[in-house]
Amino acid sequence: MKVKVEKFWSAWKDEMKKILEIVHELEKMAAKEGHLLAVGLVSGTCQLCEKCNVEKGICIHPTIKRYSEEGVGVNVKATAEKAGLKFTLPFNKNPDTFALLLIE
């Protein structure tokens, strides 16, 4: 069981990093189109570091880190479903990762 759980979270962490890269690119594209206040949000907790440095008061990735959708009050399940995305709990095989780009 422990191996299965570790595999699950490892897959989720890898997916989070990919989604974060995509969100950054989308933010840049939006800015180039004149949407300077566009902001991306990602689901779940930050996975950039093995051990978070915020306990010492400073994030070592402030230009990469994005807030979670849940952390700012977005109902991820309802938002995904309204956008036509399938959201299943519990996850079938690997965790589902979501991101949201807000454009003013």
Image (cartoon, helix red, strand yellow):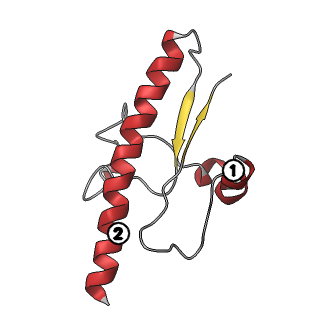
Q: Along the horizontal axis of the image, is 44 left or right of 12?
A: right
> Does residue 75 lie above or below 63 as drawn?
below
Say which residue appears at 67% left-offset and 59% top-offset: 77
Q: Which residue is mark 1?
A: 84
First of labels 1, 2 by sequence position: 2
> Does residue 89 lie above or below 16 as drawn?
below
- Frontmost of labels 1 and 2 is 1
Q: Along the horizontal axis of the image, is 55 left or right of 51?
A: right
Say which residue appears at 40% left-offset and 41% top-offset: 20
For the question of whether residue 91 can be seen, the reply is yes
Q: Nearer the viewer, residue 59 or 9?
A: 9
**Amino acid type of the residue tagged 1 in the rendering:** Gly
Q: Nearer the viewer, residue 65 or 59?
A: 65
Q: CA distance from mark 1 to mark 2?
A: 25 Å
> Does residue 49 lie above or below 59 as drawn?
below
Q: Position of residue 79 (x, y in %)?
A: 70, 50
Q: Which residue is mark 2?
A: 9
Residue 25: give its label: none
The secondary element bearing badge 1 is classed as loop
Q: Along the horizontal axis of the image, is 42 left or right of 6?
A: right
The secondary element bearing badge 2 is classed as helix
Q: Position of residue 47 (x, y in %)?
A: 35, 54
Say which residue appears at 55% left-offset and 10% top-offset: 33
